[in-house]
Image: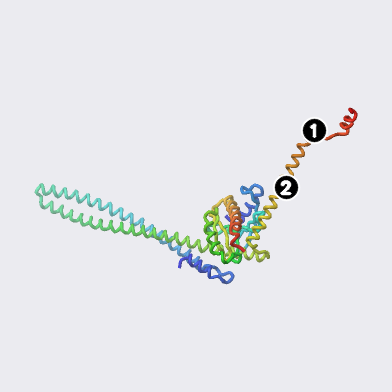
Amino acid sequence: MSIFRKIITAVRGGAREAGESIVDANATRIFEQEIRDSEKHITIAKRDLTEVMAKQMQAARELTQLQVSTKEHEGYAMQALNQGNEALAIEIAEKIAELEANAADQQQANESYLKSASRLKELIKKSERQLTDYKRQLSMVKTTESVQKATSAITDNFTASNSKLLNAKDSLERIKQKQAMFDDKLKAAEQLDAENSDSSLQAKLQQAGIGAQPTSAQSILDRLKSK
Amino acid sequence: MNIHKIATHLNQLDDNTETGFSFDCTPINGDIDVLQVEIVGREEIPIFISISDNQILCIAYLWGEDEVKAELKTNMMDAMLEMNIPMPLSAFAKIEDKYVVFGALSVNSSLDDIELEIVTLSDNSLEVISEMDSYLN
């Protein structure tokens, strides 16, 4: 069963005993073991691959040498035949037969090393994919456990502090009210600021004798005298 | 990264925050350490932070199953799925019988990234409750 399904089934199952883990406690250990095993397999496969590739290169090199040597001896055999030295030619032909047999062996070895190498490469790729998958699944198990533990810590804390999570709409309403109150305060402060700066401008204007001046007793007296 | 480092960072921000919010952090002890982060002015919807092997999880609880108008549940879920991608940095989830929004960050995230995540999550949760208003009791 996939870990996704396991988690969903466990969560849907509900009615768990207090403190019981959503995911089988063994799941984590099993995944960790699988991951260690996969890593070990990959290490061994990589070492084998290096060895096989080295052997394959060696076989290929020897094959080339044998082929070169065969060509050489074919030349020698032709020369011996041209000289009419049949006995030497036969001796050389025997050598060529030996070289060709060796070459065939090396060819076979080379092919089988190539096959092993490509099989090992496939295996490593597959194991690496598997490893990534195990790690992903382990992370899911661990996160599920961690969320569950966090949730129970949060729930316990709420119970302990005797408070509870408010209804969502009420919470939003209260936050909005606080925000409105804050905004009102800000507006009031701005208004007050504006009024203050307004009255200070008035004072400056009066001092400079600009705009409407307050009527003083002296000015009234002056006006009466002038009548 | 651990929750105490995050708490220390958020508490010392005062007026020097990039996001313009003040934070109040309380660690909750349990099998796994959880940090309760309250944004000043939004105490009703705290953000809970926990850290596992490879990620930092930030969760805000939205509403319980019992708050959903039963006959509109499918419509609500449709709306949530449609909103899931456009909603920045957060995604919907359900923990036991509670609907949540959450964000997951790499454990290598910077403290500024974490602060941004918390504030975005808080903004998103208010927005979501406001949007989903008609599906809730």
> Dot 2: within a 10 Å radius of its alpha carbon, few (fewer than 14), some, or many (20 or more) residues?
few
**Residue B65 to residue A67: above or below:** below
In this rendered view, identify the residue nearer to me: A70 or A16: A16
- How far separated are the C-alphas under marks 2 and 1? 29 Å
* Amino acid of disc 1: Gln
Label ID, residue A188: 2
Residue B79 visible to an observer of this rendering: yes
Task: Please give left or right for residue B121 compared with residue A58 in the image.
Answer: right
Residue at screen point 46% across, 62% down: A134
Residues marked 2 and 1, same chain: yes
Query: Residue A147 location, x and y as percent?
Result: 56, 62
Label ID, residue A207: 1
Classify the position of the C terminus of chain B by image quarter.
Answer: bottom right
In this rendered view, identify the residue nearer to me: A27 or B24: B24
Residue B61 visible to an observer of this rendering: no
The reply to whether the C-beta atoms of the residues labelled 2 and 1 are less than 8 Å apart is no
In this rendered view, identify the residue nearer to me: B124 or A121: B124
User: Regarding mark 1 in the picture, which secondary structure is present there?
Assistant: helix
> Dot 1: within a 10 Å radius of its alpha carbon, few (fewer than 14), some, or many (20 or more) residues?
few
User: Regarding mark 2 in the picture, which secondary structure is present there?
Assistant: helix
* Amino acid of disc 2: Ala
